[in-house]
Image (cartoon, helix red, strand yellow):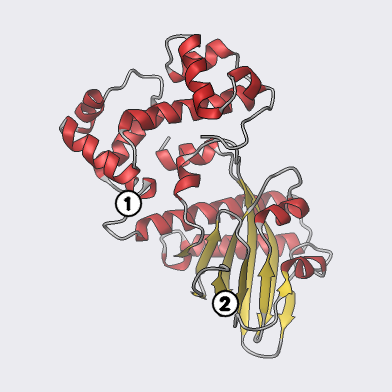
Amino acid sequence: MDVLSDVLHTIRLEGAIFLNAECHEPWCVDVPKGSDLARSFKPGTPSLAICHTVLEGRCWVKLPDGEAVGLHAGDTVAIPHGDTHLIGSGLHHAPVSVDHMVQVKAPGGLAPVRYGGEGDRTVLVCGWFAYEHDLPNPLVTAMPRLFRSSIRNRPSGPWIEQSIRYAVQEAAAGQPGSGAVATKVAESLFVETLRGYIESLPPRHLGWLAGLRDPQVSKCLSLMHNHPAQDWSVESLAEAVHVSRSVLAQRFNELVGVPPIQYLIRWRLALAARLLRSERLNLNRVIEAIGYESEASFSRAFKKEFGVSPGQWRSGKAASSPA
């Protein structure tokens, strides 16, 4: 499994399309923070990420403390940390709450909701995404508060766009299984938007996402993710990547922000946290799966990372903010 797929699997990404809107200028929508949306769409989840896809027309999106970002037909914008934001033909118009638009939508679920004036039309499809928030994950940390990608210009663009249109049509018609179809389409849309953003990063961009593009660092990450229990050292990783120890250590630390072995230790503990709580594996199997030599050393490292013992974590207890 590649690194991006591995971390997406670890955080248990799931999503759904919740709004199919036909907006006419002038229009503006206020989208509340993800924790508020979670109460409506997925109770029990701390927060939701949001994606907006422009199928036709154009609009603007803006975080409270950010600059307005223009969106054109074929663009998708993601707000992965659930920040409140505005989206509209003009952001100075008096906004309507997205809750109001969802409440007035047709009984079919995703039939188009018309909103705005009598001006130019924009067709907007919106999706929510949930992921586990209490597990440390390099992807969640690396994603900016807002990112945009031109889905239409990607190799998968025609398929994604056609799938979105098909999913909302099926849901509006009340076809059996349409909810499952819309869920898979929404998840694919988020992943493609993220992939497009990674590919668009400037050459000098630093961070875990940039590391996925670097030939040596990405291969090093892949080795650690695919074989977390192996007794890796910087030397053995460098040999497998076919670079010197010093080159790998410098490049990895420069892009990812931590040395390779420190990253490996934290990834092993993140895997252990998921195995303990989600997979309900016993402690010995968890220790074997992540490559620790003893229960004592694992328990010390786990408590240092999460603030609680493995047993307390399994029972649902957690420190106020994981390391």
Residue carrying label 2: 56
Ranked by sequence position, the earlier of labels 1 and 2 is 2
Q: Amino acid at mark 1?
A: Leu
Residue at the farthest right position: 107
Circle 2 SS class = strand
CA distance separating discs 1 and 2: 34 Å
Q: Residue at x 41, y 60 (%)?
A: 155
Q: Residue at x 30, y 37 (%)?
A: 219
- Figure quadrant of the N terminus: top left
Residue carrying label 1: 206
In-image side of 44 versus 143 (left or right): right
Circle 1 SS class = loop
Q: Residue at x 21, y 30 (%)?
A: 238
Disc 1: CA contacts within 10 A as few (<14), some (14-19) or many (>=20) = some
**Image-quadrant location for residue 44:** top right
List x then y, in percent, for residue 223: 34, 30
In the image, residue 83 sits, relative to residue 282, either above or below, namely below
In the image, residue 122 sits, relative to residue 34, either above or below, namely below
List x then y, in percent, for residue 51: 58, 60
In the image, residue 268 sits, relative to residue 165, either above or below, namely above
In-image side of 172 versus 188 (left or right): right
**Image-quadrant location for residue 84:** bottom right
List x then y, in percent, for residue 131: 60, 44
Disc 2: CA contacts within 10 A as few (<14), some (14-19) or many (>=20) = some
List x then y, in percent, for residue 123: 62, 75
In-image side of 246 versus 160 (left or right): left
